[in-house]
């Protein structure tokens, strides 16, 4: 079946006023993107091995994967691991594809592991870890165009806008603030279209509206989707070593979340319709979300024999306090001479809410052969259907969101594999693979214009060298390919034009320098 879903943004707002509009602007897709961690953005060593570090240790990535691994440190370490990332998004609409590439430098990981205690009793050692890890990178830009496709395939969005305000009086939709308080978000484009002279009343008092350009006008249109932001986590961890056999650990993670998404839709007439006629317009929607959250990680590693390690870890949901901001803008351009050009903003939405991201369970096993290398395999289960929105002030809405989350998302089963070889003393060659499962229950969901990742794979390789007992340098490369839920060119009206199919590949280079003391 075909599921047309702009989720709660549009459904609840269809009957909402300002008091309930705040809840309606949150989407289940927003919670999803804060739950999809990518362990290839941490230290260079763990990235090269696919993030398969649930049973491995003595690496700062243990703080965000399995804190029990800190117990394997025998000395203290300081490490910094920046990375350079280049991402290309391909968006295909009506058989035409467009590529857009974005390159960015980031600080992937920085931190220290302080080996505070070494003894001869049952508690052999204790290590305190303090650090920062990048978990999610939102920096992407996509571009779709429908140039020269003709009016049957490529109708004007003004047709859709006109339909959303039919029956509304000009006094209401022409007012500066009233329509944004009394009408739903899905009608705001029509309001702004009227205020910028692009929707005209068919006759005075009819409350019926038509676009400023007529039926059959050939339209060139583009949609640019610009996303910025990240999820970073500050970790405070403790790792305990009992008799070099049992390792236990705990992490308190404090997350900083920032997400900024701007959809800029442009139309221009392919035909000159005369002086003073409509030439084109730009319609943008800006979503900004910022938040601070806290989570807890508990881990255990057992080494039944010297070369074998078995690890498990539990990550609680991140309990996040979020602030949401949303605004729309419309700019109209008419052929000269004309005094009809307008630039109007909607009233902004600003509200606070809380949410829980997805909980997860990790299990791993690794085997090391001194002088040859090691292999590590991880399994991770993430309960995306356990995400929740809380404290919106609308209990019924929260229940509806919970039911939608259960209906559209399912638990995902992720697998990561890592290999490290030692061809000569102090030289390490690494490779890895990570498979992140599709969390969607349906393959034909059409999301709103913001891009929602459904699944992805990481392919990685790297090399490391220990220059002495105190200095290490690691270099890694990760290739990632992402699949996205289908999205729409026309806001709230995908059936007019069909779906945008989006894929992405990302090249990430990581360099880590560590100092032991």
Image (cartoon, rainbow, N blue to C red):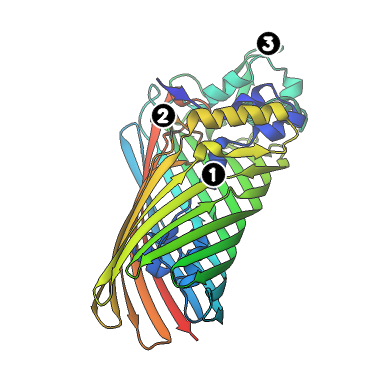
Looking at the image, is mark 1 or mark 2 earlier in the sequence? Answer: 1
- Which label belongs to residue 206? 3
Q: Residue 27 at what x, y percent from top left?
A: 58, 36
**Helix, strand or loop at mark 2:** loop
Foreground pick, 42 / 275: 42
Q: Residue at x 64, y 20 (%)?
A: 165
Q: Residue at x 67, y 28 (%)?
A: 397
Crowding around mark 2 (Cα neighbors within 10 Å: few <14, some 14 to 19, many 20+) is: some
Q: Residue 416 at what x, y percent from top left?
A: 35, 54
Looking at the image, is mark 3 or mark 1 earlier in the sequence? Answer: 3
Asked if residue 6 can be seen in this view, the reply is: no
> How far is disc 1 from disc 2 in space, using C-alphas?
19 Å
Q: Residue 362 at what x, y percent from top left?
A: 45, 52
> How far is disc 3 from disc 1 in space, using C-alphas?
50 Å
Q: Residue at x 70, y 17 (%)?
A: 168
Crowding around mark 1 (Cα neighbors within 10 Å: few <14, some 14 to 19, many 20+) is: many
**Residue 423, picture quadrant:** bottom left
Q: Residue furthest bottom?
A: 468
Per the image, the residue denoted by label 2 is 442
Foreground pick, 19 / 197: 19
Per the image, the residue denoted by label 1 is 358
């Amino acid at each position: 079946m075909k599921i047309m879903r702009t989720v709660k943004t549009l459904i609840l707002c269809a009957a909402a006023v300002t008091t309930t509009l705040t809840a309606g602007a949150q989407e289940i897709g927003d919670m999803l993107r804060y739950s999809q961690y990518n362990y290839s953005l941490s230290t260079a060593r763990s990235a090269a091995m696919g993030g398969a570090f649930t049973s491995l240790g003595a690496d700062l990535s243990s703080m965000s994967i399995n804190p029990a691994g800190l117990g394997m440190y025998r000395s203290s370490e300081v490490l910094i691991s920046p990375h350079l990332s280049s991402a290309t998004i391909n968006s295909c609409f009506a058989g035409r594809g467009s590529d857009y590439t974005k390159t960015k430098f980031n600080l992937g990981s920085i931190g220290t592991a302080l080996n505070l205690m070494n003894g001869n009793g049952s508690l052999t050692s204790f290590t305190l870890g303090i650090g920062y890890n990048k978990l999610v990178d939102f920096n992407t830009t996509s571009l779709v165009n429908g140039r020269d496709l003709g009016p049957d395939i490529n109708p004007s969005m003004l047709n859709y806008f006109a339909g959303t305000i039919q029956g509304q009086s000009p006094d209401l939709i022409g007012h500066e603030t009233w329509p944004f308080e009394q009408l739903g978000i899905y009608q705001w484009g029509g309001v702004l279209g009227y205020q910028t002279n692009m929707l005209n009343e068919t006759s005075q008092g009819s409350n019926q509206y038509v676009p400023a350009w007529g039926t059959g006008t050939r339209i060139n249109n583009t949609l640019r989707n610009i996303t910025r932001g990240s999820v970073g986590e500050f970790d405070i961890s403790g790792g305990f070593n009992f008799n070099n056999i049992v390792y236990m650990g705990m992490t308190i993670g404090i997350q900083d979340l920032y997400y900024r998404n701007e959809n800029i839709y442009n139309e221009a007439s392919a035909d000159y319709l005369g002086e003073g006629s409509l030439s084109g317009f730009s319609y943008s929607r800006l979503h900004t979300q910022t938040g601070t959250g806290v989570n807890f990680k508990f881990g255990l590693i057992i080494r039944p024999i010297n070369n074998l390690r078995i690890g498990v870890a539990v990550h609680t949901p991140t309990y996040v306090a979020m602030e949401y901001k949303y605004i729309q803008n419309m700019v109209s351009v008419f052929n000269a001479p004309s005094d009809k050009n307008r630039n109007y903003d909607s009233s902004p939405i600003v509200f606070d809410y809380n949410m829980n991201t997805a909980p997860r369970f990790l299990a791993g096993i690794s085997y090391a052969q001194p002088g040859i290398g090691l292999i590590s395999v991880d399994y991770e289960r993430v309960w995306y259907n356990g995400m929740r929105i809380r404290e919106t002030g609308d209990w019924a809405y929260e229940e509806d969101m919970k039911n939608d989350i259960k209906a559209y998302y399912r638990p995902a089963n992720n697998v990561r594999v890592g290999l490290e070889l030692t061809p000569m003393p102090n030289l390490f060659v690494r490779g890895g693979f990570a498979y992140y499962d599709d969390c969607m229950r349906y393959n034909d969901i059409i999301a709103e214009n913001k891009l929602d990742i459904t699944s992805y794979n990481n392919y990685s390789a790297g090399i490391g060298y220990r220059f002495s007992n105190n200095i290490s340098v690691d270099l890694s490369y990760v290739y990632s390919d992402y699949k996205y839920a289908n999205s729409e060119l026309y806001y709230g009206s995908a059936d007019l034009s069909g779906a945008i199919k989006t894929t992405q590949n990302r090249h990430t280079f990581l360099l880590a320098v560590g100092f032991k003391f």
